[in-house]
Image (cartoon, helix red, strand yellow):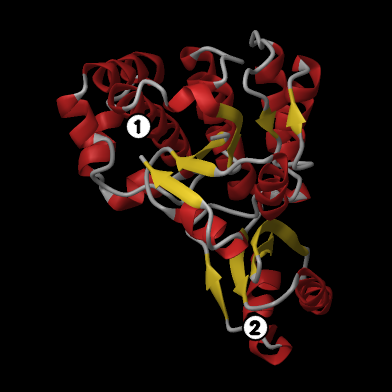
């Protein structure tokens, strides 16, 4: 049964995540202990005990989800040694793409964690430099959301940032423009607009300072061809060429996330079983909106 591994992105974090795995699974404990050495602080302490505000900060939540997801992967390996045999593709939502690349052997855990830490810092710095935000617009097709953004641009920069699933599209931009989107959304027929708990306008040009810092960090890391292929958020296509992987990871910070297209392309590839590996069930929910009947195992 052809399957795909999916890894969650920022926003999936909850206080308490990873604690049970840390306490019960030596392989998971090692990941968190190694992470503490690399990061210079106890990641498991923040994951297990919070406080929420600290865990939700971009610089902490990105490494936390990355490590917690790889700990969940170790749990799956312990439960079902054959689960990986049928995997023909891997993908991750935004930050989750790094987790997918480590799973697929493209980079080491240590290199992946250092990159994720640098990415979180760079994105936080870019967000601090420009007051910006993200909001999810529910109940509208992409062309209607584009019209909504066009009208809201009188207040500042705003654009589609995440095409997650039918009728769930996140937009990013200057804070004033996001407030305008939220105000105008009912007039355009949206069910609602929900402000996202992120530091700023991810996946837009506002993050340009971050992609430059990330490019420098990526240049210093050894990358090997991922196996299975990892599907990029930028173009919803599989990539195994290492130069392409590097380039796409840089572009990802300022480009819209094509998650719905990725899921549809994986289904067209013949994937019949998905595994969501990591905290939360966000990806399973998005998948159900694309194809209600497909199987998704949460780990």
Which one is in front in this view, the residue at disc 2 or the one at disc 1?
A: 1
Callout 2: helix, strand or loop?
Answer: loop
| Picture quadrant of residue 42 | top left
| x 55%, y 55%: residue | 287
Taking the image as shown, residue 16 lies to the left or right of residue 106, namely: left
Taking the image as shown, residue 233 lies to the left or right of residue 102, namely: right
Taking the image as shown, residue 283 lies to the left or right of residue 181, namely: left
Image vertical order of residue 296 relative to residue 6, above or below: below
**Residue 192: which numbered mark, if any?**
none
Task: Identify the residue position indicated by label 1 in the image.
Answer: 72
| x 62%, y 61%: residue | 290
In this rendered view, identify the residue nearer to me: 105 or 35: 105
Image vertical order of residue 286 relative to residue 3, above or below: below
How many numbered marks have been drawn onto this rendered protein structure?
2
Taking the image as shown, residue 168 lies to the left or right of residue 6, namely: right
The answer to whether residue 118 of the structure is visible from this angle is no
Q: In the rendering, at what x and y percent does residue 66 appear?
A: 45, 32
Callout 1: helix, strand or loop?
Answer: helix
Label 2 vs 1, first from the N-terminus? 1
The answer to whether residue 113 of the structure is visible from this angle is yes
- Which residue reaches farthest front? 1
Q: In the rendering, at what x and y percent does residue 236 appear?
A: 75, 42
Q: CA distance from mark 2 to mark 1?
A: 36 Å
- Which residue reaches farthest bottom? 187
Task: Identify the residue position indicated by label 2 in the image.
Answer: 190
| x 59%, y 67%: residue | 136
């Amino acid at each position: 049964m052809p399957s795909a591994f999916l890894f969650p992105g920022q926003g999936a974090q909850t206080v308490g995540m990873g604690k049970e795995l840390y306490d019960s699974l030596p392989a998971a404990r090692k990941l968190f202990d190694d992470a503490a050495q690399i990061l210079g602080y106890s990641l498991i302490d923040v994951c297990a005990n919070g406080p929420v505000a600290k865990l939700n900060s971009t610089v902490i939540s990105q490494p936390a989800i990355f490590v917690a997801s790889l700990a969940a992967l170790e749990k799956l390996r312990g439960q079902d040694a054959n689960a990986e045999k049928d995997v023909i593709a891997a993908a991750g939502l935004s930050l989750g793409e790094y987790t997918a690349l480590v799973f697929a052997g493209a980079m080491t855990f240590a290199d992946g964690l250092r990159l994720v830490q640098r990415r979180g810092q760079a994105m936080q710095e870019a967000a601090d430099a420009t007051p910006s935000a993200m909001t999810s617009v529910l109940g509208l097709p992409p062309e209607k959301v584009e019209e909504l953004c066009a009208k809201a641009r009188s207040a500042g920069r705003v654009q589609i940032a995440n095409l997650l699933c039918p009728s769930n599209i996140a937009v990013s931009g200057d804070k004033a423009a996001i407030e305008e989107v939220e105000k105008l959304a009912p007039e355009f027929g949206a069910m609602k607009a929900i402000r996202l708990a992120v530091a700023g306008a991810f996946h837009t040009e506002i993050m340009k300072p971050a992609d430059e810092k990330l490019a420098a960090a990526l240049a210093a890391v050894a990358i090997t061809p991922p196996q299975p292929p990892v599907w990029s958020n930028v173009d919803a296509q599989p990539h195994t060429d290492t130069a392409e992987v590097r380039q796409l990871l840089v572009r990802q910070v300022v480009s819209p996330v094509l998650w719905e297209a990725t899921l549809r392309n994986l289904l067209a590839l013949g994937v019949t079983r998905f595994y969501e590996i990591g905290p939360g069930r966000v990806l399973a929910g998005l998948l159900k909106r694309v194809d209600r009947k497909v199987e998704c195992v949460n780990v």
